[in-house]
Amino acid sequence: MTIRTLIEDFANKLSSLMEGQALDRARLAVESALGVGGRRRGRPPKNATAGAAVAVLGRKKRKKGPKQLCPIPGCKNPAAPVFGMVCAKHKGVPKAQIKKYREARRAKKLKTKK
Ligand SMILES: [Zn+2]
């Protein structure tokens, strides 16, 4: 065995060792990012992950602000922009009528606020 083969052997072992360590480190990084391994900055990892997921989901759902309800009195259905901000049930209601309902609702809201 020459010194060269010895060095090559050593280099091979070292590189495989470092590969293994890199893999371990990558796994640890992923685990800590997911909140699986260990605590991060004193926060409970489970809650942090759930909170982040909720924040992401909430942001996705509430991109256009809080959910609006159909302005028709007594209707509790959510309004959809595709129907002109009324619910699916009242999409046939004339716009002028909806405008009146909307104004009435706004006036009521302002009154209850003050
Ligand atoms: Zn409605």
Image (cartoon, rainbow, N blue to C red):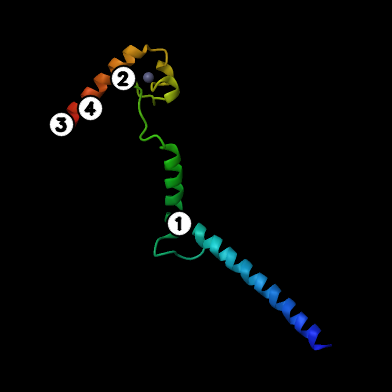
Between the C-alphas of marks 2 and 3, the distance is 23 Å
Q: CA distance from mark 1 to mark 2?
A: 41 Å
Q: Are marks 4 and 2 in contact (CB under 8 Å)?
A: no
Would you identify the image quadrant in which residue 56 lies? top left
Q: Residue at x 63, y 66 (%)?
A: 23
Asked where in the image residue 15 lies, by quadrant, the reply is: bottom right
Quadrant of the frame with the C terminus: top left
Left or right of residue 49, residue 104 in this image: left
Amino acid marked by disc 1: Lys
Going from the N terminus, do you reach mark 4 or mark 2 first? Answer: 2
Quarter of the rendering occupied by the N terminus? bottom right
Percent coordinates x, y for residue 17 in the rendering:
67, 75
Q: Quadrant of residue 85?
A: top left
Residue marked by disc 3: 114
Q: CA distance from mark 4 to mark 2?
A: 15 Å
Residue carrying label 1 = 46
**Label 3 vs label 4: CA separation?**
9 Å
Three-letter code for the amino acid on which mark 2 is drawn = Gly
Q: Where in the figure is residue 11, as x and y percent of width and height?
A: 72, 79
Is residue 27 toward the left or the right of residue 43 in the image? right
- Mark 4 CB near ligand 1 (8 Å cut): no
